Image (cartoon, helix red, strand yellow):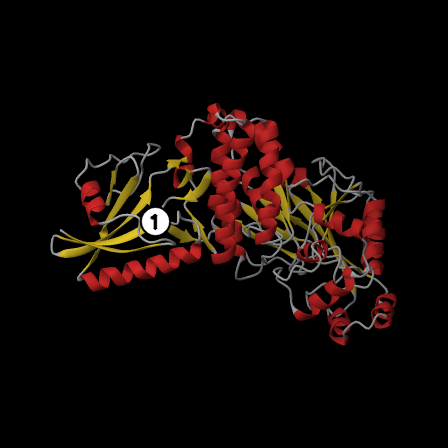
Amino acid sequence: MDISIVGSLHDTPPIDQMDVLQLWNSERVSLSHNGKFSGKPTTRIYVNDNWVLKIHRERGFRSQAVAEKWCHLQIKKEQNYNIYHPQRTWIACGIDNQWIVANITPRMQALHTIDFLAIDSHERVRLLAEALQIYMTFTTKFALRLDEGLSNFSLYHGKVYYLDDDIYPWDNFYSFSAMLGNCIRKTPALAMNEDSWAQLGEILQPILRDHSSEAEDIVHEGLIDQLVGQQEIFKQAFLTALRPTYKVTMTQRASGQFHASDAIAILADVHGNLPAFQAILHELDKYGIQQYFILGDLVGYGPHPKACIELIQERDMFCIRGNHDHYVAYNGDVRVAMGKMAKWTADWTLDQLDDDDKMWLGALPVRHQMDGWMAVHGSPVDKSFFNGYVYNMTSDRNLDHLISMNMPICLHGHSHIQGVYARRKGQYLPFDTRKGDINLQKNEASLVCPGSVGQPRGGVKTIIAEAAIFYPDQSSVKMLAIPYDISPVIADMEKHHFPQQLIQRLYEGK
């Protein structure tokens, strides 16, 4: 067998050909799930007290030059990743009329083999936090993900490294949330208590913020849905620390606990339009409604963001967060999807609200779920819950998602177009834009948009404010469209030099 030691990540290769041969001729290690060593069926591992040799027989090359070139490219890539031990070394081996590649790494202790009961609570949290930090730093920089299991992270002289060779496509925190859920289910083995999980949540929050402002929401919502059995108390401790929703000066007082026997006023996309907001509330008051739910985007586009927030707080309305709210809450996060005009008004809004207003917006949940129905600003299939749209091209996928969740009704905003998408007996129904009562009982799944209070886009040139009344126990909605005097809104938009395009959009209803 011919051996070529191609190079290590940061140091002169710490081994020579004799070391490789000795490892190769040692007894092959058995691989098993959750054992000391794991890997693919095609992977072969040999170990001694100091080194681990991992051979990739599936990576065969026709010549030494090609195999060495592959190793050089891999070394360069891994140096950029900065997640592996610096002595990690790649080699090319000529065997059975082909050249295969392998790597050698110092022998380290995989995290899943550590006796967490034998170490103190600070060290337990530190080890888990370092693994999460490695994962998140990597995915933030490269938009890829590591293999999430603790068996893929190892400890060497007090420092945590990534151990696995494989890198995977980014899945928007789906696997990351699953890993956290799995760790929580293993709480007894990890010897973690409520305080430890809370500490880990506090550590993870700024790490997620470095990735994106919506990351903690996505992880929070992804973890809420996971069943952890008797470890639920630890999950809640972690979530409370990760997303301290109610640790703000001026949190919303409404509980979000709606009575199914009573009507609920459903509003969306108020967008800082106070006259439209007041008009629709005046109409809803005629029905004697006591429960109000706003599906996000309280601000943006309109000239009255602070007045609308104050009215919402005054009337104890329950709200979830929209993309405009999120942008303002996080002081203009450029990663929030937003067009040119939307960004102009959102940036203007930033100067109209104080820190308490922004904290209040940032503390709003991104999803709400009750028995038999749920609510988001954007779309249920979108991980952020406020960026995705429900419209003709996406409605089928979102309806199928609701059915997979066994969730018959989803209330949403964001599209600014009043109506219902539905699936019944396996068939997708045409978009229902009728005013008045719409019965949802026969539908397998329904996506209900109450339209927009402050900026309807249904193409109706009559100046209206839109909303709906939802009757949960009857599975029905009443769609409302109320005319109002637009002149005060236009006057204030002109006073503050809003773009003419935004003013014209209100007139045109699109």
Q: Is residue 239 visible?
A: yes
Which of 130 and 8 lies nearest the eye of the viewer? 8
Answer with left or right where residue 475 lies relative to residue 230: right
Tell me the quadrant of the picture where the C terminus can be found.
Answer: bottom right
Residue at the spot of label 1:
88
Question: Residue 463: horizontal and vertical position, in percent?
Answer: 79, 66
In the picture, measured across the screen, residue 503 lies left or right of residue 145, that is right
Instruction: Identify the residue shown where x is 48% and y is 41%.
Output: 131
Choose top left, top right, bottom left or bottom right for residue 467. bottom right
Tell me which residue sits at (36%, 53%) in the image: 11
The count of marks equals 1
Q: Looking at the picture, how far across and down is residue 214, in whole percent?
A: 61, 51
Q: Can I make out residue 404 in this image?
A: no
Helix, strand, or loop for circle 1? loop
In the image, residue 84 above or below residue 241:
below
Kind of residue at badge 1: Arg
Q: Residue furthest bottom?
A: 500
Q: Is residue 273 above or below residue 403?
A: below
Q: Where, by quadrant of the figure, is residue 27 drawn?
A: top left
Query: In the displayed structure, does residue 470 sit left or right of residue 154?
Result: right
Mark 1 is surrounded, within 10 Å at the Cα level, by few (under 14), some (14 to 19) or many (20 or more) other residues, namely many
- Where is residue 319 shown, x and y percent of the image? 73, 46
Q: Position of residue 317 (x, y in %)?
A: 78, 44
Q: Is residue 256 above or below residue 337?
A: above
Q: Of 349 and 2, which appears nearest the observer?
A: 2
Front residue (pair 436, 270): 270
Image position of 190 (left or right of 357): left
